[in-house]
Amino acid sequence: MKGSINKILKRINKFIKNNKLFVSFVIVCVLISFLLRVLTIGFYIDLKAILADILVSIFIGSFAYFIKVDKRYVYYLIWIIFFSILSIADLIYYEFYHSFISISLLATTSMVGKVNDSLFAKLKIHQFIFLLFPIIFILIKKRLIKKDYFSKLEEFNKKTFFKKMYLIILIILVILTFSFTQNDKSKFSNFRNKEYVVKNYGLYVYTFYDLIKNESSYDEAAMKFREYYSCKKESSDNEYTNIFKGKNVLFIHAESIQNFLIDLKINNQEVTPNINKLAHEGMYFSKFYPQISVGTSSDTEFTLTTGLMPSTNGTVFVNYDKNTYKAMPNYFNDLGYYTFSMHANDRTYWNRESMYKRLGYQKFYAKESFIVSEDINSENYIGLGLSDKSFFKQIIPILSDIKKNNTPYFGTIITLSNHSPYKESQKFGDFDLSMSYKYTDEEGNTIVGRRKYLEDTEMGYYIKSAHYADEAIGDLFNDLKENNLLDNTIIVFYGDHEARLPKKEFERLYNYDPINDSLLSEDDENYYSMDNYNYDLLRNTPLIIWSNDEKYSKEITKVMGMYDVLPTIANMFGFKEKFSLGQDIFSSEEGIVVFPNGNVLTDNVYYSDLYEEYITFNSNPISSDYINNLKEYANNILEVSNEIVEHDLIKTESDKLGECIK
């Protein structure tokens, strides 16, 4: 036995000796993929992912043996450079979107130039660590030359080499095949949880599969569509049915306003006093969650107005703007409303000009409708363009003209100033983010001091930016009131998505210790845990439905998603909607939010599709059936929505719905 092992070890040693460049290539490629997983998903040693990386690296590397010896190094180096650049792009993208790059996103590259400041603000030195790998490989080659490795190479049988390599590949394939579960099959087929694929099968398998994946067949998608909507139950009437029927409605789409800002005080000063006032006077949905993918603000607009989910392939606004949808502006058009949207950005950004026609907006007041100074230091220019304060001042006469037509109106007002990066708003006022402290030392002396706390941090810049945005909202409401534009009008205020601040920024916000100028330790009684679950749950944004009628002032703590807004508004304004995947929040027994990556949040649990585990929010027992039903519900919602978008099913199949057959 010992002799056999020694014989095998000698063969392995001889192989490595004659193929050092090849072996180095495989090792470097595996390390690149492993490091990407560490820097994105976390430090998880997954044997399947490592084996998959080895398989792909051997497969690619073996082709070098069809090339002359002196050219193989160049072949390997090109692949290593490619994988390194791909990893840099994926890391930057992940830190911005919490997902990985897909070929379907190429159509959205035109958006990058218009938000390049936001992109550059996300660039960090550690993201370029992958550039070390080509350098390492160059150094390996130089060392091999120094050792006169290439001239001493023994001749070997290439046929034997390929037999050995493809035997290894076959063995790895067999191992991966037997470990491939039904759950893995589901994750690959829908390809929505890209983190799961990278975590379990590595960067290279993910990238290759992304290139070859196919859409579902039309017939299969159409059948699922008919089954779902034929059996969909209509919301029942409740105490809020028709309460706003015939009233005007203005949606305020607040850029990057997160819910943790509500009632947040620093140095006893409210960060968002005007939004707080709205929350206390109106219906405040404190557990309202965006359901965005890579389309960010455009995903919010799509999901909120249609009740459908974002696409898993690209973005709906860019990739599927020729489809037929039944959206909130469409429904209000049917009620005789004048429908419009206002945004001080280019009308082509996120392809809004084209997509708005599909959603039913009659008019789009874009950048050219407003006066924007060419001087970026001007008071009316901030961040990406026209400041919110100037924008709001300029929309008042437009709204007054619309009101004169004596027809009810539905409008969306999209803010801009609180877009990342958040440094710009400092020039329009300051907000003290330092922290004073006082304690008695061991000798009984009273020590008083002041720390920078959040000054010069990403969180600090964001809070100052949000404070400016809040001031603009306060000015808007004052102007609406002075011009009698709040009469018979409902305001729906919502944050469009989270601010995409790193976890460490929340650690500093909640766990700062000014005495030691450090963070509290985890065993401190005042420590606020910022684990993955709490970090995810902090991504909610405020939703406020405000009216002059104080009897509707209340906080709703039921979990709610963007896709619930259309059915909830439909009930309040007295129309029936047909294709949303959410529910009227006041008719639902339990709130349930399905996220594009397959995670699910309810009033009882938060389930992670990546880690396939959950946390509970109360003492109610959670059965395995409950979790399995949640997973099935989420999968159904995501599949139906994606197939509607990919195959334009509302246009082709909506008139074929029949009786529910189960």
Image: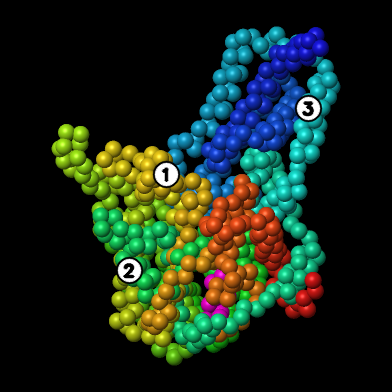
Secondary element type, mark 2 = helix
524 to 140, vertically: above or below: below
Name the side, left or right, on which 600 lies relative to 459.
right
Residue occupying the point 84% across, 22% down: 159
Q: Quadrant of the N terminus?
A: top right
Residue 578 x, y percent position in the rendering: 65, 77
Q: In the rendered structure, which amino acid carries the disc numbered 3?
A: Ile
Residue 533 lies, in percent from the top left, at 52, 50
| Percent of width and height locating residue 522 | 41, 40
- Whether residue 400 sits left or right of residue 131 in the image: it is left
| Residue beneath disc 2 | 274
Residue 168: image tag: 3
Which residue sits at x=54%, y=46%? 94
Residue at image x 79%, y 68%? 223
Q: Position of residue 339 (x, y in %)?
A: 51, 80
Q: Nearer the viewer, residue 354 or 413?
A: 413
Between marks 1 and 3 in the image, the one whose residue lies nearer the viewer:
1
For residue 119, above or below residue 588: above
Q: In the rendered image of this protein, does residue 233 appear above or below residue 91?
A: below
Disc 2 from disc 1: Cα separation: 28 Å
Q: Nearer the viewer, mark 3 or mark 2?
A: 2
Gap between marks 1 and 3 measured at Cα: 43 Å
Q: Which residues are magenta?
A: 563-573
* Amino acid type, callout 1: Lys
- 10 Å crowding of disc 3: few (<14), some (14-19), many (20+): some
State which tag comes first along the sequence, 3 or 2: 3
Could you tell whether 431 is left or right of 358 in the image? left
Residue 547 in which image quadrant: bottom left
State the mark number for residue 504: 1
Residue 90 covered by magenta stretch = no
